[in-house]
Image: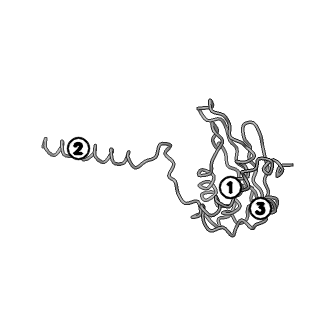
């Protein structure tokens, strides 16, 4: 009986050790965002999973996700609150709002606008304005990598980002 118990505990320890080695430090599973391509604003699960995987300002986290689906234009509101560790410098909210809105519009078919409510600032980004800024229909992108590479040149120039919000 003692050998069986010892074998069980050793197996359990090996399992826990291997499970720990496969998890990442923040507990978030990095999934392919484009598995949610062609989602709709009314799909809580898809929009929630997209929002969880998008970058957030340093020291802040999404506290609330609101889906505005009663009548067009349909929208999404992302409310951010300070996380437990607020000693880090906040990210550039404008660039982050544009980057995250880009992914939301590329993935969520009927999203017309996104409100970002950060601790210090709030921004609304519309699909029409963002696609006009890029000069491209965001629904044409087929992968995360392709979309990320496309956006890089737009975020290199801080003046360009600031001009979007004027």
How crowded pointer 3 is (Cα within 10 Å; few <14, some 14-19, many 20+) is rated as few
Residue at mark 2: 10
Residue at mark 1: 152
Residue pictured at 43% horizontal, 47% vertical: 23
Q: CA distance from mark 2 to mark 1?
A: 49 Å
Q: Quadrant of the N terminus?
A: top left
The reply to whether discs 3 and 2 touch (Cβ–Cβ < 8 Å) is no
Quick check: 159 left or right of 6? right
Which label lies toward us, 2 or 1?
A: 1
Image location of residue 151, percent across then percent down: 69, 58
Residue pictured at 68% horizontal, 55% vertical: 152
The first of marks 3 and 1 along the sequence is: 3
**Helix, strand, or loop for circle 2?**
helix
Q: CA distance from mark 3 to mark 2?
A: 57 Å
Residue pictured at 13% horizontal, 44% vertical: 3
Does the image show residue 130?
yes
Relative to 94, is 82 above or below? above
- The quadrant in which residue 40 appears is bottom right
Image location of residue 109, percent across then percent down: 70, 66
**Helix, strand, or loop for circle 3?**
helix
**Helix, strand, or loop for circle 1?**
helix
Residue at mark 3: 134
Image location of residue 95, percent across then percent down: 72, 48
């Amino acid at each position: 009986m003692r050998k069986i118990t010892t074998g069980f505990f050793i197996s359990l320890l090996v399992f826990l050790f291997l499970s720990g080695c496969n998890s990442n430090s923040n507990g978030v599973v990095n999934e392919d965002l484009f598995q949610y391509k062609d989602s709709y604003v009314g799909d809580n699960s898809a929009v929630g999973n997209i929002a969880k995987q998008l970058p957030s300002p340093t020291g802040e986290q999404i506290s609330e996700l609101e889906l505005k689906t009663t009548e067009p234009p349909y929208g999404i509101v992302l409310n951010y609150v300070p996380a437990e560790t607020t000693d880090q410098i906040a990210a550039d909210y404008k660039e982050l709002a544009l980057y995250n809105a880009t992914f939301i519009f590329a993935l969520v078919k009927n999203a017309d606008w996104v409100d970002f409510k950060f601790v210090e600032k709030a921004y609304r980004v519309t699909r029409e304005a963002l696609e006009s800024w890029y000069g491209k229909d965001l629904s044409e992108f087929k992968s995360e990598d392709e979309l990320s590479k496309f956006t890089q040149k737009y975020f290199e120039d801080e003046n360009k980002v600031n001009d979007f919000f004027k």
